[in-house]
Amino acid sequence: DVPEGVEFYENEGHDHLPENSRSFYKTDPPTSGPHDPRWLPPSVYEANQTRPELLVHNLEHGNIVIYFNRSGLSASDIQWLTELTNQHIGQWDGVLMVSRDDKDHPLILTAWRAVLRMKGLEKEKVLRFVDAFRGRGPENPVR
């Protein structure tokens, strides 16, 4: 059950790059494409703690990456998202949060080939997106 407003994009590939290499992605934030051979453990990250090439590998694993702008969301919104993230820490079905300075869309959810841009927290929409895509990446679907 995919929530209204999800944008779908073409698969830009699955190739592994040499470690710490950069890639150009057609979407911002990226939803597929060449990526680092490493990935990040599901958790909450500041923008400077990660790179798109790592996060794309997480998406390939079936993780959801939630980009959030601290200045565009309330403390209780961020707390709710953090609790959601901490409930899903599996390598193949995890959730990550990454801070991002996006004034137009303080909340952006990404999965492999899918993006949902939001002006604010709509809990039901977030839960539906996470349920629709988490654990369903192309590398090792577990749900």
Image (cartoon, rainbow, N blue to C red):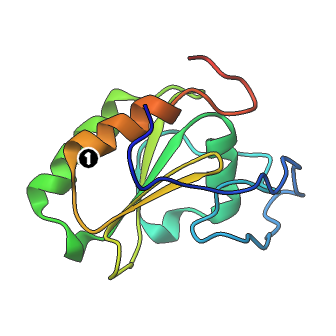
Q: Is residue 77 left or right of residue 141?
A: left
Please identify the quadrant where the N terminus is shown: top left
* Residue located at (34% from left, 39% from top): 85
Q: In the rendering, at what x and y percent does residue 23 appear? A: 80, 69
Does residue 15 sit above or below 72 in this rendering?
above
Q: In the rendering, at what x and y percent does residue 45 appear? A: 42, 57
In the image, farthest residue toward the top = 143
One can see residue 39 in this view: no
In the image, farthest residue toward the bottom = 103
Q: In the rendering, at what x and y percent does residue 124 appear? A: 23, 40
Q: In the rendering, at what x and y percent does residue 40 appear? A: 58, 45
Does residue 63 sit above or below 9 in this rendering?
above
One can see residue 136 in this view: yes
* Residue located at (72% from left, 54% from top): 32
Q: Nearer the viewer, residue 110 or 83?
A: 110
Other-residue count near label 1 (Cα within 10 Å), few / some / many at <14 / 14–19 / ≥20: many
Residue on which the image places disc 1: 81
Q: Is residue 128 left or right of residue 47?
A: left
Does residue 17 sit above or below 64 in this rendering?
below
Please identify the quadrant where the C terminus is shown: top right
Secondary structure of the residue carrying tag 1 is: helix
Q: Amino acid at mark 1?
A: Leu
Which quadrant of the figure has residue 3? Answer: top left
